[in-house]
Image (cartoon, rainbow, N blue to C red):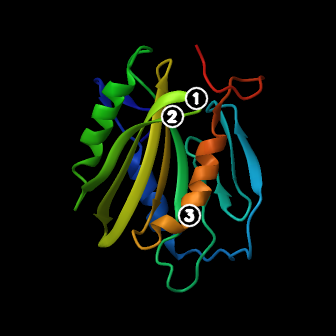
Amino acid sequence: MSNCVVRDTLYFPFILILAHLVIFSSIPIPTAIGTSSLTPYNNPSLGFSLEYPSNWQKDESDPTAPTFLSPYGGAEDRVQEVITITTEVLPTTDYSLGSYTEAALDQIEPFEDFALVSSSSTTLAGLSAHMVVYTFTDEYIPLQNLQVWTVINGTAYIITYGGTPEEFDSSLPALQSVLDSFRLITAGSPPVTSLT
C-alpha cells in the first residue's frame, strides 16, 4: 500500500510489514556463526543506499519495499526479525515531518492490542526524523515494531524493524547498522546525507 495517496489520506506502509512477518515466519534460513560483515545495498529507483548484515537475507520480491530477514534462529524462533525500507509520495512537496508523524500514529493506533512504547525525535540520513516503538497483535502473534521516518521534498522514507517482543532486542545491532548507514541518493550520484 505504500506510494499511494488518495483524497489526502496517507496509506502508511505498515500492512506490508505485517505480511512479511507472517509469510516469512516459517521459512528456515541457516544461521551464520559469529559476527557478520556488512553488505552494501543501493536502490537508486527509491533514492537510498544502506548497509545490512551479510548473514541477513535480502528480499526484493516487492520492488517498492526491499526487505532484509534475520537468520533463522531455530525451532523456537516463531517469527524472523524483519527490516523493511519503504517510501511514500506525499500530497505536497512541503508536507512536514510533524504532519506525517501525526498521520502515521493515526494509522497504527487501531492495530489490535496496540501499545505505544516510545515516540521521539531522532535523525535519519542527517535529517530530522521521528522514531516510534510499539507492540500489537497480528493473527494471535504478539509483535513489536520500531519505525524511523523522515520527510523531504514530498517523499517519506520509512525504516521498519519488526519481530516478536521476546526476540526484539536480539537484532537491534543489525537495525543500528542499517540506520547508521542509510543515505539518500539521487540517480547517478553518490549517497548524500541531505537534500535541499
The answer to whether 66 appears left or right of 87 in the picture is right
User: Within 10 Å of the Cα at label 1, are there few (<14), some (14-19), or many (20+) other Cα atoms?
Assistant: some
Is residue 61 at least partly visible in the picture? no
The earlier-in-sequence mark between 2 and 3 is 2
On the image, numbered disc 2 is attached to which residue?
Answer: 123
Please name which of the two marks, 2 or 3, marks the residue nearer to the observer: 2
Residue position for label 1: 126
How far separated are the C-alphas under marks 2 and 3? 20 Å
Asked if marks 1 and 2 touch (Cβ < 8 Å), the reply is: yes
Check residue 171 in the rendering and tell me which mark sits there, or answer none: 3
Q: Amino acid at mark 1?
A: Gly
Instruction: Assess disc 2: are there few (<14), some (14-19) or many (≥20) residues with their C-alpha within 10 Å of its C-alpha.
Output: some
Position of the N terminus, as image quadrant, is: top left
On the image, the x and y values in percent for residue 174 come to 61, 58
* Residue furthest to the bottom: 75
- Mark 1 to mark 2: distance in Å? 6 Å
